[in-house]
Amino acid sequence: MTIFQIVLLAISAYFAYRIYEHVQGLQDPEVKSDTLSSSFDAHSLVEQADEAFGANDMKKAIELLSEAATKKPDDSEILFKTGYILQKQNNNTEALKYYKEALSLDKNNEFIHNSIASVYRANGEFVSAKIHLDDSLALDDKNKITYYNYGNLLVDMQKIDGAKEMYKKALEIDPDFREASAELVKLT
């Protein structure tokens, strides 16, 4: 073997080794893709949506929740959060659709009942709002927010004595509940 052939053999071996490294490197992204895909699973997307909501980026939050819903279409939390953001954007009609779908998946969720009641109240559908607040209280009669919301509904219905009672119940649960205290003062 000549020196030239030995050099060519060494260069060929070097390039063969580099190709081998490259091929091995191509297998690593499969492992990496698992970690990447986990950042795009439904749970991670909901967390990112929560962050976007916290940053007041409602458009991004809705987009992330929509993507999460494609991955987990029967997840009441995703539907509820989508409805909540739509309600914050004053899109009560769409919010109610999401809330109702969430409720069909989780009938024992007091927060969904509370949110549906809030939409009905905003739409002037007081009887429907009352039904959902009653359902929420049946699930948890220690939720100060439900009593507060019920008081607000009764004010709208011009049932002042009932509203006072609801605000008092909220204050029994949390004596430092400023909003309930302020509403009660307005009524006395």
Image (tube, rainbow, N blue to C red):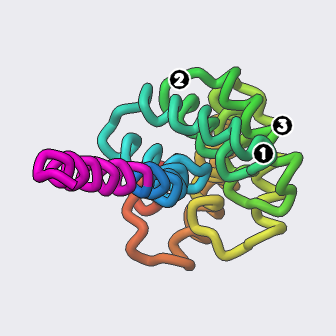
Expressed as whole percent of the image width and height from the top left, the position of residue 150 reads 67, 52
Q: Does 183 sit left or right of 135 as displayed?
A: left
Q: Give amino acid for label 1.
A: Ala
Q: Does 163 sit left or right of 131 as displayed?
A: left
Q: Give amino acid for label 3.
A: Val
First along the sequence among labels 1 and 2: 2
Task: Name the mark on residue 181.
Answer: none
Q: Assign the N terminus to one quadrant of the image.
A: bottom left
* Residue that appears at 38% across and 74% down: 176
109 or 176: nearer the viewer: 109
Q: CA distance from mark 1 to mark 2?
A: 19 Å
Q: Which residue is mark 1?
A: 102
Q: Does 64 sit left or right of 13 as displayed?
A: right
Expressed as whole percent of the image width and height from the top left, the position of residue 69 reads 68, 39
Q: Which residue range is magenta in the image?
A: 1-23
Say if 13 sits above or below 158 in the image: below
100 or 124: nearer the viewer: 100
Expressed as whole percent of the image width and height from the top left, the position of residue 154 reads 68, 45
In the structure shown, which secondary structural element does the residue marked by tag 2 occupy?
Answer: loop
Q: Nearer the viewer, mark 2 or mark 3?
A: 2
User: Crowdedness of circle 3 by 10 Å Cα count: few (<14), some, many (20+)?
Assistant: some
* Residue that appears at 56% across and 78% down: 173
First along the sequence among labels 2 and 3: 2
Judge whether residue 8 is colored magenta: yes
Q: Residue furthest left?
A: 3
Q: CA distance from mark 2 to mark 3?
A: 21 Å
Task: Name the mark on residue 127.
Answer: 3
Q: Which residue is mark 2?
A: 90
Q: CA distance from mark 1 to mark 3?
A: 21 Å
* Residue that appears at 25% across and 52% down: 9
